[in-house]
Image (cartoon, grey):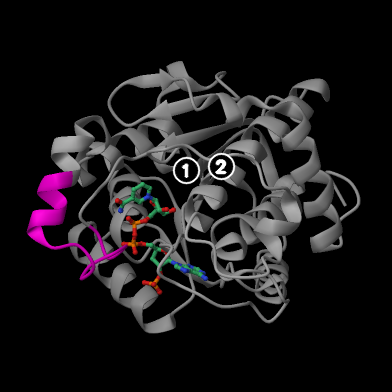
Amino acid sequence: MNTVLITGANSGLGFETARRLAAAGRPVILACRNHDRAEAALEKILDESPNAQVTTLALDTSSLKSVRAAVDSLSGVKLAGLINNAGISPLHDGKTPDGFELVFATNYLGHFLLTLLLLPQLTPTARIVNVTSDMHNPPGGITWPGVEHLAHPSKVDRRKYAYSKLANLYFTYALARRLKAQGSKITVNAFNPGMMQTNFAPATRTKEEVDEIKRRMPDRIGDLDTSADTLAEMMTKPSLSKRSGAYVDRDRGVARSSELSYDERNQEELWEASLRFTGMETLDE
Ligand SMILES: NC(=O)c1ccc[n+]([C@@H]2O[C@H](COP(=O)([O-])OP(=O)(O)OC[C@H]3O[C@@H](n4cnc5c(N)ncnc54)[C@H](OP(=O)(O)O)[C@@H]3O)[C@@H](O)[C@H]2O)c1
């Protein structure tokens, strides 16, 4: 009844959050694209917490077919928490089998479909968290290029990661609005973990580059343990049960996201297009 599903739970933030929740006695589903990495994560959690209730689920967020298959295999399972965490860096190029830009589909669109399909299986006071990044507002800023540019860009755009994380925020705010309008007690919030040492971009930054980032943007540096503690608390702390539609920073609590992220017209443009892209019609199809 208290089960939490975490996407991308075999590594980094997803794994650290899963092991905290499992150690605290919460049943956890590790939703991962790679079977062996998922099993290794499960074994590690069981080594630490032998009584933990942990299972794995095959899920590739870049494939709408995989998302639907994962939800089918969860038939009858009730979830009290959903952490949409899986993500890839802008260094990944390409298109998904569904024809979408890879980073947009992996970081955002797959989670949009997963969440909408799982809504009927969430408990009445379930908590959803979408992992975003303060890089939704990169140095120099971004403007809204329209959904088509995110989904089907005519050429590679290095801002695609920022757009995907802005999309996580647009999704959070648009879904929170809808849940509130329906009188639902399900909450949805966005989480910014800050820059952490994970598998996210392992060999791409030299020590000098990291030092330069720390010098230029000290407020963007996070810490994996602090972020995982905060993310796990977003699932468990009773005092957070009613907060919805917020942008939560790993050590600053509720914060303001970029001005662009509050643009409701853009939020609605993305919502409508996402329904079309995923073949969904309503919130609870
Ligand atoms: N690290 C940072 O500096 C930073 C900063 C701000 C925000 N974030 C966000 O934090 C989240 C977690 O990232 P992390 O830093 O923990 O990186 P990580 O260690 O690379 O973990 C990412 C997880 O996502 C999984 N994943 C990637 N593509 C997937 C797909 N198509 N389907 C299912 N799972 C997939 C990975 O699986 P594999 O092991 O199979 O690749 C891995 O389990 C991401 O949303 C990222 O955008 C990270």
Asked whether residue 209 is drawn in magenta, I would say yes
Q: Nearer the viewer, residue 192 or 242?
A: 192
Task: Name the disc covering residue 132, or none.
Answer: 1
Task: Name the disc covering residue 200, or none.
Answer: none
The residue wearing badge 2 is: 166
Name the residue at 43% across, 63% down.
90
For the stretch drawn in magenta, the main secondary structure is loop
User: Residue 98, relative to residue 133: is it above or below?
Assistant: below
Q: Say which amino acid is labelled 2.
A: Leu
Q: Nearer the viewer, residue 278 or 180?
A: 278
Q: Could you tell me which secondary element the residue under label 1 belongs to?
A: loop
Residue 8 vs residue 172: left or right? left
Q: Quick check: marks 2 and 1 in contact, CB under 8 Å?
A: yes
**Magenta region, residue range:** 198-212
The residue carrying pointer 1 sits among few (fewer than 14), some (14 to 19) or many (20 or more) residues within 10 Å by Cα, namely: many
Residue 131 vs residue 274: left or right? left
Q: Say which quarter of the image contains residue 205.
A: bottom left
Q: Could you tell me which secondary element the residue under label 2 belongs to?
A: helix
Q: Nearer the viewer, residue 176 or 144?
A: 144
Q: Say which quarter of the image contains residue 39.
A: bottom left
Q: Position of residue 64 (x, y in %)?
A: 71, 70
| Viewer-side label of 2, 1 | 2
Mark sitting earlier along the chain (2/1): 1
| Callout 1: CB less than 8 Å from ligand 1 | yes
The residue carrying pointer 2 sits among few (fewer than 14), some (14 to 19) or many (20 or more) residues within 10 Å by Cα, namely: many
User: Residue 266, relative to residue 163: is it above or below?
Assistant: above
Q: Position of residue 206 (x, y in %)?
A: 13, 63
Q: Say which quarter of the image contains residue 123.
A: top right
User: Residue 168, relative to residue 184: is it above or below?
Assistant: below
Name the residue at 68% across, 24% down.
185
Q: Say which amino acid is labelled 1.
A: Thr
Residue 272 vs residue 62: left or right? right
